[in-house]
Amino acid sequence: MTQRFESRTVLITGGTSGIGYSTALAFAREGANVVIAARSDQNGEKVAAELKQMGVGAMFIRTDVTSDKDVEHLVAKTVAEFGKLDIAFNNAGYGGMTVPCADFLESHWDQTIAVNLKGVWLCMKHQIRAMLASGGGVIVNNSSAAGLNGGPATGVAYCASKHGVVGLTKAAAAEYAAKGVRINCICPGVVGTPMANESFDGSAEQPEIVKRHPIGRIGRPDEIADAVLFLSSTESSFLIGAAIPVDGGLTLDN
């Protein structure tokens, strides 16, 4: 059976848990070499070992996505190990505070914007350079349903950062589409991940959160992974600069 991503090299930030981890597993099942980036050495090495047991090339590189030096090293080491970078999923994120705008702390604003928006830009900056050098590639950014609408449950900095990811995706997609680098983003609804549970006081399965999704439940990480693989494949070859809701209908009324 042909694997869609056999011999492809995929880089995933925030790849040790939640959506990133599920996406790493999905790419490995499809034959890709997978590089995961995160800040936790212990979790990163554990996931890399798990991926290697699936019979693919895998590597963990400790990375702070808000550091240009770290991100440059991440991409350079990926290319040095596997020859090129074909696909990148910029998934690392930070939930931040959910207090009203006038009560928001500047330090939390700065941290949220640094991880969720600056981090995506830094990753794209170095990923695009590597992809142009090898003839092209695909980038998928992780925005959010909060990047398409707004509300008190999301927090102003998170909402602003994720709107920024949508704009960044569209602008960069227009700049590089003709040069062989295809860029899109996904906009998940609430998904059952450790970060979501932390953001919603321990559980994202609260009735008031579930009922906002017309499908009647929150999402699963593997469902988001499926969307990332679609956007990374030739099946989506005519999609450029799209911000695709993968949200159980959450944004339908907004």
Image (spheres, rainbow, N blue to C red):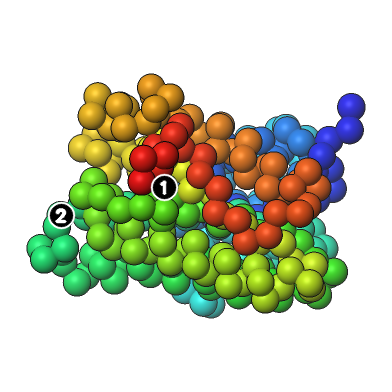
Q: Are marks 2 and 1 in contact (CB under 8 Å)?
A: no
Q: Residue at x 79, y 73 (%)?
A: 179
Between residue 175 and residue 56, name the one nearer to us: 175
Q: Is residue 21 above or below residue 140?
A: above
Residue 199 as seen in the image, left or right of residue 18: left
Q: Which residue is drawn at 67% across and 76% down?
A: 175
Q: Mark 1 points at which residue?
A: 145
> Label for residue 74?
none
Q: What residue type is labelled 1?
A: Ala
Q: Which residue is drawn at 80% across and 47% down?
A: 234
Q: What element carries label 1?
A: helix
Quarter of the view holding residue 180: bottom right
Residue extending furthest toward the left: 103
Mark 2 surroundings within 10 Å by alpha-carbon count, few (fewer than 14), some (14 through 19), many (20 or more): some
Mark 1 surroundings within 10 Å by alpha-carbon count, few (fewer than 14), some (14 through 19), many (20 or more): many
* Percent coordinates x, y for residue 183 in the rendering: 66, 61
Does the image show residue 49?
no
Q: Residue at x 36, y 40 (%)?
A: 253
Q: In this view, does 194 lie above or below 1?
A: below
Residue extending furthest toward the right: 1
Q: Which of label 2 and label 1 is nearer to you?
A: 1
Residue 13 as seen in the image, left or right of residue 107: right
Residue extending furthest toward the front: 253
Between residue 37 and residue 107, name the one nearer to us: 107
Compare marks 2 and 1 and give the one earlier in the sequence: 2
* Percent coordinates x, y for residue 248 in the rendering: 46, 32
Q: What residue type is labelled 2?
A: Val
Q: Mark 2 points at which residue?
A: 99
* Percent coordinates x, y for residue 42 in the rendering: 48, 46
